[in-house]
Amino acid sequence: MTTFGDAGFMAKALRLAARGRFGTHPNPRVGCLLVKGDTVVGEGWHRRAGGPHAEIDALAASGAQARGATAYVTLEPCSHHGRTPPCAPALAEAGIARVVIPTLDPNPRVAGQGVAMLRAAGLDVDVGMLASEARALNAGFFSRMETGRPRVTVKLAASLDGRTAMASGESRWITGAEARADVHRLRAESSAIVTGIGTVLADNPSLTVRRPELDLQGRQPLRVVLDSRLRMPADARMLSLPGETLVFTALQDPAGAEALVAAGARVETLETESGGLDLAAVSRRLGELECNDLLVETGPRLAGAWVLAGLADRIVVYLAPHLLGDAARPLMVLPGLESMSDRVQLEFAGVRQVGRDLRIELALGEG
């Protein structure tokens, strides 16, 4: 039976889990709080894949005080050997009396088996406390496990009149330094950053996280370039930077692919009927590669394609307080919208000021 204090303790466990939001890929972010009466005797969180899970971290902190305690864990304890041993039997062996979790693990290798193992060992288990908050913290992980594809965020920087660059392509800088720093947090939370070959050829971007205060546990998000005709330059800046670059192409060009591989890229050919890249196939493949969250940073045409394909889960727009004029490039290219009934419906999920700019988060709504 849940108690009045369960919500407060679970909220603290979720805050612990959030400490690992940049480093746990491809694992979920998990926190654990061990409580006896009203006293916290141990706490822990998962920091990186291959490192101790939150439960093991908390048990190490509590020592013998764990016996008889209640464990507040932000996701069902695992029951299988993965990169590390399972956590459900470790909780039982430590003498934990009760376990409170928000939700079952969507990973089919767990999916209720951890709870069954705990109950078989005689522990009380309560499921459902702050479930929506726990899912939100690991939205990409739930998406990958439940649908086979990552959660997709399309990021845009625009002027107040919805323009992303001058007609010439000049765009540095639409937003201020604070907004650009916030983009690095979005990148750090992502498994992969996706862009198009047009952006690479025009801007030669790095697509890296360059904020030392963001603890990625030594990783960089996977950089993904959509390049149907394999025009990626072998001397592109991102190929010389830490982390991996994956180039998706629709063209069978062994010599071109070999040159990119020699420069440090991975190249995969996705078969398509149209000769272009199918974004659904790209999304599924990145799910297979254990990507939980994709951040799309690209031009208006490809950004619009993700939205029109129904593959964007949210849009984050950094809106700057200036005007670029009607000749400047649009926020998105969305062909085929001819009447109000064709419009793409969005829902405001959050608005806040970042420096002099506004950060607007939108969820894809029902039409």
Image (tube, rainbow, N blue to C red):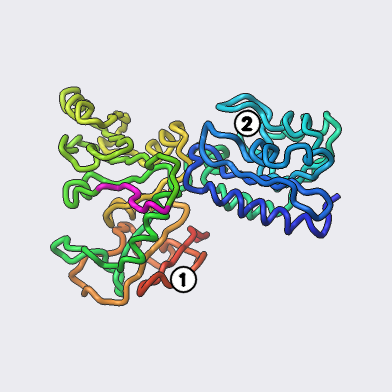
Asked if labels 1 and 2 touch by Cβ distance under 8 angstroms, the answer is: no
Q: As drawn, which residue projects farthest toward the left?
A: 168
The residue positioned 36% from the left and 45% from the top of the image is 193
Q: Amino acid at mark 2?
A: Pro
The residue positioned 65% from the left and 26% from the top of the image is 80
The residue positioned 20% from the left and 43% from the top of the image is 237
Q: Dot 1 surroundings within 10 Å: few (below 14), some, or many (20 or more)? A: few
Quadrant in which residue 143 is drawn: top right
Judge by depth and name the residue closer to the eye, 333 or 122: 122
Q: Residue 240: x, y in percent?
A: 22, 37
Counting residues from the start of the chain, the first of labels 2 and 1 encountered is 2
- Real-space Cα distance between discs 2 and 1? 37 Å
Q: Any magenta on residue 157?
A: no
Against 66, residue 326 (above or below) is: below
Q: Amino acid at mark 1?
A: Arg
Residue where numbered disc 2 is placed: 108
Residue where numbered disc 1 is placed: 352
Give, as a single range, the part of the protein colored magenta: 206-213
Against 72, residue 173 (above or below) is: below
Q: Residue 153: x, y in percent?
A: 42, 52
Residue 116 showing in the rendered view = no
Q: Answer with left or right where residue 215 lies relative to residue 237.
A: right
Q: Answer with left or right where residue 301 lies relative to residue 203.
A: right
